[in-house]
Amino acid sequence: MSRTFGVGIVGAGTIAKVHAAELAGVEGAELVAVVERSGEDGRELAASHGAEWHPDQEGMLARDD
């Protein structure tokens, strides 16, 4: 049985987009959260990877996954 490892990324800039794209190819890993103060950029990156957007780190760290 394979397990999924949830990953959160802080930021939604160029390097975050590269990391998210590379993470998609890692077996057993899944982008679950994106932290970005800019709602537009954060929501866009999160949505493109099936993740949830958070405006601050506290929201991401409060997740139970």
Image: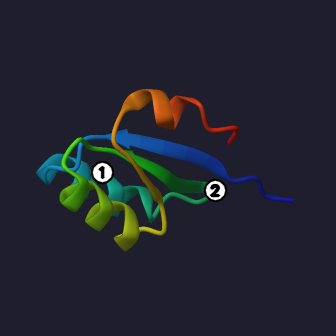
Q: Is residue 14 left or right of residue 17?
A: left
At mark 2, the secondary structure is loop
The foreground one among 40 and 50 is 40
Q: Which residue is mark 1?
A: 19
Label 1: few (<14), some (14–19) or many (≥20) C-alpha neighbours in 10 Å? few
The answer to whether the residue labelled 2 contacts the one labelled 1, judged by CB atoms less than 8 Å apart, is no
Q: Amino acid at mark 2?
A: Gly
- The quarter of the rendered structure image containing the C terminus is top right
Left or right, residue 49 beside residue 19:
right
Q: Residue at x 63, y 46 (%)?
A: 5
Q: Residue at x 63, y 56 (%)?
A: 28
Name of the residue lying farthest toward the bottom = 48
Q: Which residue is mark 2?
A: 28
The answer to whether 32 is drawn above or below residue 59 in the figure is below
Q: Sequence order check: which comes first, mark 2 or mark 1?
A: 1
> For this view, does 55 lie left or right of residue 31?
left
Quadrant of residue 10 within the rendered picture: top left
Number of callouts: 2
Give the quarter of the figure containing the N terminus: bottom right
* Residue drawn at point x = 24 percent, y = 49 percent: 16
Along the line of sight, the residue nearer the viewer: 40 or 20:
40
Colouring of the image: rainbow
Q: Position of residue 27 (x, y in %)?
A: 58, 60
Q: CA distance from mark 2 to mark 1?
A: 15 Å
* SS of the residue under disc 1: helix
| 5 relative to 48 in the view: left or right | right
Image coordinates of residue 14 in percent, x first then y, are 12, 53
